[in-house]
């Protein structure tokens, strides 16, 4: 098959492209390199079935051309990372909503299937644990830019489902939960690579807030597997699916585990949210997916143990730092 992947030079995108090329598919990537990197796809650029264009998903003529050339579009391009989202809310909203609209509109004429990457952030401040795909969402005040990302991704989902109902575009929505692994950067506030870098360099590992907030971390290889199985499942069309591990860990415990795996003596330093971001910053206390719908649809759920995930990230960061 021929796949068009927006954001294909990013973290998840580059792992997806590698998997597609390895199994014999043809891949076209579009990435503006704002958060992605050519380093992530350098190992693919010489492959005959791999093609890339530097550009933005909001470029409608370019996106239409590339959607038309592909059998399936996987739309991963988005503003990512808590720090980027808080500091550049206009960029966040415009990139997410306009990019998704551009892709969906291009798919209408030939009814091309589209996979939309969403996020666990859409659950907002919900306390209904674990999070189910059909549960209500609870977002914070519009005065707090923290929720701009969640709102924009929720709008992406509504837009995608509206395009399916009104215009017949086959869509699948994937809500990713803290997907991590090699090649993820800590530059925009991603917690696991940040902890790994700090531990390996003997710096203080900085835990924001109380450290009691918990998350579930899933390996990127599992996320890619789930996504591709959904693409191959006709019954998944029109569905919204949580993609993530349900192994929960506090952020403080995560910092301790990273330090142990890295063999580091780094101290752990607690940093108040108002010092890390801005006054009034809000966070979710827990974020746990219900994997039942995904498991029922494809017979698979992300299940790589957390310690193995941490080891993969630490090993990658150790090799990366050795090259710097």
Image: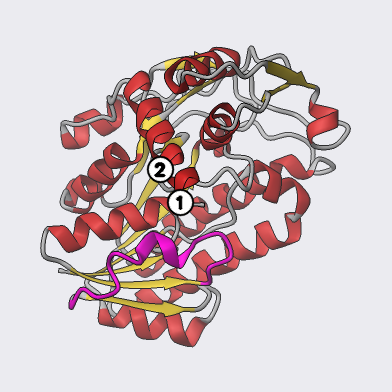
Q: Is residue 146 above or below residue 104?
A: above
* Residue in view at x 42 percent, y 55 percent: 161
Q: Which residues are magenta?
A: 32-48
Q: Is residue 298 above or below residue 42?
A: above
Element carrying mark 1:
helix
Q: How many labels, in total?
A: 2
Magenta stretch prevailing secondary structure: loop
* Residue in view at x 47 percent, y 14 percent: 260
Q: Position of residue 110 (x, y in %)?
A: 28, 79
- Near-viewer residue (102 or 4): 4
Element carrying mark 2:
helix
Mark 2 touching mark 1, by CB under 8 A? yes
For the N terminus, the quadrant is bottom left
Labelled disc at residue 323: 1
Whether residue 36 can be seen here: yes
* Residue in view at x 63 percent, y 40 percent: 189
- Near-viewer residue (273 or 169): 273
Q: Position of residue 6 (x, y in %)?
A: 42, 66
Whether residue 133 can be seen here: no
10 Å crowding of disc 2: few (<14), some (14-19), many (20+) = few
Q: Does residue 240 appear to the left or right of 215 in the view shown? A: left
* Residue in view at x 27 percent, y 25 percent: 303
Q: Does residue 94 appear to the left or right of 3 in the view shown? A: right
- Near-viewer residue (61 or 43): 43
Q: Is residue 53 above or below residue 265?
A: below
- Near-viewer residue (324 or 89): 324
Q: To which residue does mark 2 refer?
A: 319
- For the view shown, which residue lies furthest in the right direction? 279
């Amino acid at each position: 098959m021929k796949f068009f992947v927006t954001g294909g030079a990013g973290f998840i995108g580059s792992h997806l492209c590698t998997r597609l090329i390895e199994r014999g598919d043809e891949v076209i990537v579009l990435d503006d390199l704002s958060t992605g990197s050519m380093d992530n796809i350098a190992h693919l650029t010489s492959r005959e079935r791999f093609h890339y264009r530097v550009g933005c998903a909001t470029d409608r003529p370019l996106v239409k051309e590339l959607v038309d050339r592909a059998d399936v579009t996987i739309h991963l391009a988005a503003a990512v990372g808590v720090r980027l989202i808080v500091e550049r809310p206009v960029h966040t909203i415009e990139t997410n909503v306009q990019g998704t609209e551009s892709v969906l509109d291009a798919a209408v004429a030939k009814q091309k299937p589209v996979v939309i990457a969403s996020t666990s952030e859409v659950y907002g401040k919900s306390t209904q644990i674990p999070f189910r795909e059909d549960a209500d969402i609870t977002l914070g005040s519009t005065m707090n830019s923290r929720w701009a990302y969640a709102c924009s991704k929720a709008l992406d989902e509504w837009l995608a489902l509206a395009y399916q109902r009104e215009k017949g575009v086959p869509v699948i929505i994937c809500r990713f939960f803290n997907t991590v692994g090699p090649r993820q950067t800590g530059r925009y506030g991603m917690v696991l690579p940040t902890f790994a870098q700090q531990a390996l360099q003997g710096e203080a590992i900085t835990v924001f807030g109380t450290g009691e907030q918990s998350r579930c971390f899933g390996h990127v290889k599992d996320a890619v597997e789930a996504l591709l199985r959904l693409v191959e499942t006709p019954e998944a069309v029109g569905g919204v699916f949580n993609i993530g591990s349900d192994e929960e860990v506090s952020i403080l415990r995560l910092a301790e585990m990273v330090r142990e795996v890295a063999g580091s003596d780094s101290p752990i330093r607690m940093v108040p949210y108002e010092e890390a971001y801005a006054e009034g910053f809000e966070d979710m206390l827990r974020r746990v997916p219900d994997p039942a719908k995904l498991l029922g649809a494809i017979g698979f759920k992300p299940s790589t143990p957390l310690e193995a995930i941490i080891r993969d990230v630490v090993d990658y960061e150790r090799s990366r730092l050795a090259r710097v």
